[in-house]
Amino acid sequence: MRMQIILPQLEIHGFYSSFENTPHAHEDQFQITIPIKGTCHFKHEFKDMALPPGEGILLQPRDRHSLHIGDGSGLVILRISHERLYPQEFPIHREPRYRHQFDVNRVSKYVGQWTSGMMALDLADPLVEEELETRIISDLRELIWKGNVPISPQLALSFTDSNPYHQRVLEFMHAHFTEHLNISTLASLAMQSRYHFIRSFKSLTGVTPYQYVLQLRIREAMIRLQQSDETVTDISFNLGFSSTSQFFRSFAKFTGTTPEQYRKRS
């Protein structure tokens, strides 16, 4: 059995039966290989290794490698760009070890959460995809540095103190919620990293940025269904939904009814 999550800056591959690949390298990605069950027979350049469960290895871009696992074994491979593993807000960072001991149960728990997150969310909206990717990358950094990910003083201050830029973010979201928004733009308005912005925004509002935008869109849709002659398709398109099916799912989730039924009752 194989599982994979492919996002713009990150790839996660899970193998839960026999698997083997040929020597290869990744041009611009770090690779973290973590055996979950059984032994992973790993070759890095000209060195052969037998990795037991939890003993991971972190490869630099362009490192040549290959591996194989047998039946009954489990393995997780994560590939991530340099910019995401070492974000700009951490100008000074401690290099992770080449060989790293991971908590297998914790890794499995995270992978389960990431997979369920992919299945539960509507990734047709770029804002959802970006939120999920940011969360996964944050979890990955915590796994690598065991919770000791450095935080710059400026970021720590902006997170612990009341952030005056959040009002600017909210005003921007209210003005542009019908457009395609992204976490990078919103985080820059808040003067925070993407991860800290999502955390502090949820702490402030009780929901993620995407959920907040979705609420604004649904609220406006309810008004238009009551007060205009726009078709449901036009309302969906004009409010920034990627498809009418996404609009129907979101509307039903928030109101318990379909747009047509809501219009008839109004």
Image (cartoon, rainbow, N blue to C red):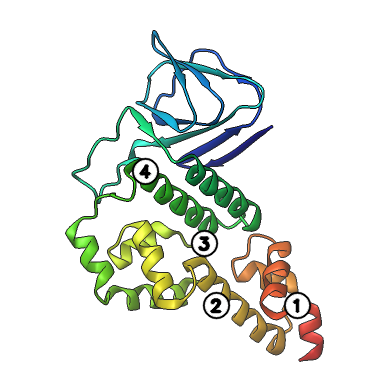
195 above or below 104? below
**Discs 2, 1 touching: Cβ within 8 Å:** no
Give the residue at x 53% y 53%.
129
Furthest residue to the top? 46
Q: CA distance from mark 4 to mark 3?
A: 22 Å
The answer to which of marks 1 and 4 sits earlier in the sequence is 4
The answer to which of marks 2 and 1 sits earlier in the sequence is 2
Q: Is residue 242 rendered to the left or right of residue 204?
A: right
Where residue 235 appears, as percent x and y from the top left, is: 67, 73
The answer to which of marks 4 and 2 sits earlier in the sequence is 4
**Discs 1, 4 touching: Cβ within 8 Å:** no
Residue 259 is marked as 1
Q: Amino acid at mark 1?
A: Pro
Which residue bears the numbered disc 2?
Answer: 216
Which residue bears the numbered disc 4?
Answer: 84
**Discs 1, 3 touching: Cβ within 8 Å:** no
141 above or below 65? below
User: Secondary structure beneath disc 2?
Assistant: helix
User: Secondary structure beneath disc 4?
Assistant: helix
Q: Amino acid at mark 2?
A: Leu
How packed mark 4 is, by other alpha carbons closer than 10 Å (few <14, some 14-19, many 20 or more), is some
Q: CA distance from mark 1 to mark 3?
A: 22 Å
Which residue bears the numbered disc 3?
Answer: 180
User: Secondary structure beneath disc 1?
Assistant: helix
Q: Is residue 86 visible?
A: yes
**Between residues 226 and 184, which one lies in front from this camera angle?**
184
Give the residue at x 75% y 75%.
231
Where residue 196 appears, as percent x and y from the top left, is: 34, 61
Q: Is the C terminus in the top left, top right, bottom left or bottom right quadrant?
A: bottom right
Q: Amino acid at mark 3?
A: His
